[in-house]
Amino acid sequence: MKARILLRHLEIPYESVVLDIFEGEATEAEHLARNPSGEVPTLELESGEFVAQSAAVLLYLAEGTQYLPDDPVDRAHVHQWLFFEQNGIEPGIATSRFWKWRGRDKEKPEAWADRIARAEDELDVLEAWLSEHDFLAAGRYTVADIANYAYTHVAHEVLDMSGRPAITAWIARVESQPGFVNDLAPFP
Amino acid sequence: MKARILLRHLEIPYESVVLDIFEGEATEAEHLARNPSGEVPTLELESGEFVAQSAAVLLYLAEGTQYLPDDPVDRAHVHQWLFFEQNGIEPGIATSRFWKWRGRDKEKPEAWADRIARAEDELDVLEAWLSEHDFLAAGRYTVADIANYAYTHVAHEVLDMSGRPAITAWIARVESQPGFVNDLAPFP
């Protein structure tokens, strides 16, 4: 989703190849040659080279565009929120959703509670920041917002988001950006 | 540790201010103003601005140096392994060590096992990659190695590393880099 949102903003034509992670297609040898972690997404360049990790894909595509500031400190703050997402939001929310789909929340309630607690802590950080800022970094919409939006906007599937009005308002702000498209339809 | 290793490589004078995370010093209001996640490290610049998240600090300091390639694809691969570390190694190993120090491995054995399992999976990825590559990205020593070194070189404190010869050799390779210093002594 993160890569697709940015590709649409930048109006870069791309082809989507969907792997079924539930069927283990991402951990087969063919895909491990593209992405040593056996994960999606993986960006294949026209050169045949690959870039893995969603946030690394965002940084690669955003270079030289309005979605990644040139100022070194602004850029550092974009990086800061990208790493925050990968260190907190993704392990907390993405994996909890995956567990719920697979029924592991019932199988391993203590580990599930641990993951949800982590997600709550990270959402507390986001809520506090967004109570005082319209966007995560550099005072404007950047790849930091795109990255954190992806799992945060579906966090309500695993926990209660009703007490987080600043996050709710920011989700609407992200979705109202010019050129924002979040769907799986092919492009162009 | 990550920031200190790079500061030493670059011979940048710095002052270390230690916060006691066990006493909650990182989550006090004064530090939250520096780092909204209430974590260490946080880099304070001469301008008075702050950069949080260890990997964002590394990227900020490494810009324009040999530790961060200029080539866009090489740089994307450095980013890829930095995000890998924050998404897998840190949540798996760093938090497991922290839990062990606090006795939570005994209090919450199922959640502990979940964290260790995650760490093992991530170390499998590193071991496979380092079996075929001397360094993580761009064919040379970069901030990607520094970031992944930090928790990986102490992973033996929480799990068995004896079956991971490629990681063991890479740890020695990192520590033998010119200017590599890993200590808490003040500098200069």
Image (spheres, coloured by chain):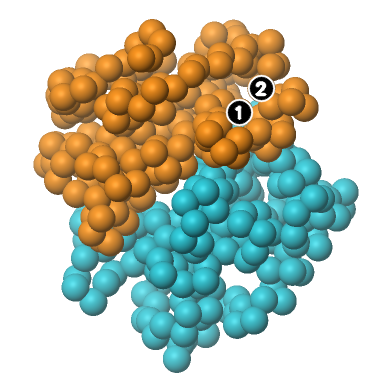
Chain colours: A orange, B cyan
- Seen in the picture, residue B82 relative to A154 is either above or below; the reply is below
For residue A39, the mark is 1
Residue at left 66%, top 30%?
Answer: A38
Q: Amino acid at mark 2?
A: Ala
Determine if residue B162 is in view.
yes
State whether discs 2 and 1 lie on one chain: yes
Determine if residue A128 is in view.
no
Q: Amino acid at mark 1?
A: Glu
**Quarter of the picture holding the C terminus of chain B:** bottom left
Left or right of A161 in this view: A34? right
Residue A166, percent across and down?
Answer: 16, 29
* Tag 1 secondary structure: loop
- Seen in the picture, residue B6 relative to B120 is either above or below; the reply is below
Residue at left 27%, top 72%?
Answer: B45
* Tag 2 secondary structure: helix
Q: Residues within 10 Å of mark 1 (few under 14, many from 20)?
A: some
Residue at left 71%, top 31%?
Answer: A32
